Image (cartoon, grey):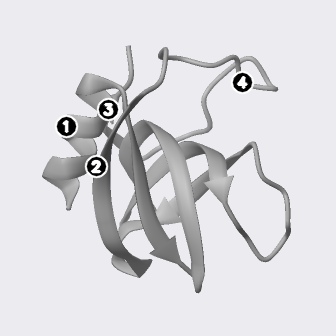
Amino acid sequence: MEQLIQQAITTKKLIEFLYSGHPRLIEPHVLGVNGCVTQVLGYQVGGSSSSGGISEWRRFDLPKISGLKLTSTSFPGRRPFPSGKHSSWDRQIAIVS
């Protein structure tokens, strides 16, 4: 799963998966470790969520992701962050350029 997310970050391709019972479509921006859990930080552009907010930054724990697929749809790259900086990580594995 990590390799597929790294590939998506490198090639700037959207990924889709199920998380907490909801389909997600995201632009993967950072793959990293936070609190001993590997996570992907992405900008959700489609699917659904329990909060209802789509087009929003979200972190997803990799152990809770199922049905991960790399799509053929590209995204342009980095997006501005509301705070102007990335959230903190214990270790970054991959980051979109």
Q: Nearer the viewer, mark 3 or mark 2?
A: 2
Decide: is 6 above or below 34. above
Give the residue at x 27% y 47%: 5
**In the displayed structure image, the side of residue 47 where residue 51 appears, left or right:** right
Decide: is 15 above or below 16. above
Q: CA distance from mark 3 to mark 4?
A: 17 Å
Q: Nearer the viewer, mark 3 or mark 4?
A: 3
Q: CA distance from mark 1 to mark 2?
A: 9 Å
Considering the numbered disc 3 on the image, is that residue within a helix, a strand or a loop?
Answer: helix
Q: Quadrant of residue 51?
A: bottom right
Image quadrant holding the C terminus, namely top left
Q: Which mark is residue 81?
A: 4
Which residue has dot 2 on it? 70
Q: CA distance from mark 3 to mark 2?
A: 10 Å
Decide: is 68 above or below 97. below
Q: CA distance from mark 2 to mark 4?
A: 24 Å
Considering the numbered disc 4 on the image, is that residue within a helix, a strand or a loop?
Answer: loop
**In the displayed structure image, the side of residue 42 where residue 83 appears, left or right:** right
**In the displayed structure image, the side of residue 21 where residue 66 appears, left or right:** left
Q: Residues within 10 Å of mark 2 (few under 14, many from 20)?
A: some
Q: Nearer the viewer, mark 1 or mark 2?
A: 2
Residue 58's spot in the image, x, y percent? 64, 52
Which residue has dot 1 on it? 7
Three-letter amino acid code at disc 2?
Leu
**In the displayed structure image, the side of residue 28 where residue 79 appears, left or right:** right
Whether residues under marks 1 and 2 lie with C-beta atoms below 8 angstroms apart, the answer is yes
Q: How many marks?
A: 4
Whether residues under marks 1 and 3 lie with C-beta atoms below 8 angstroms apart, the answer is yes
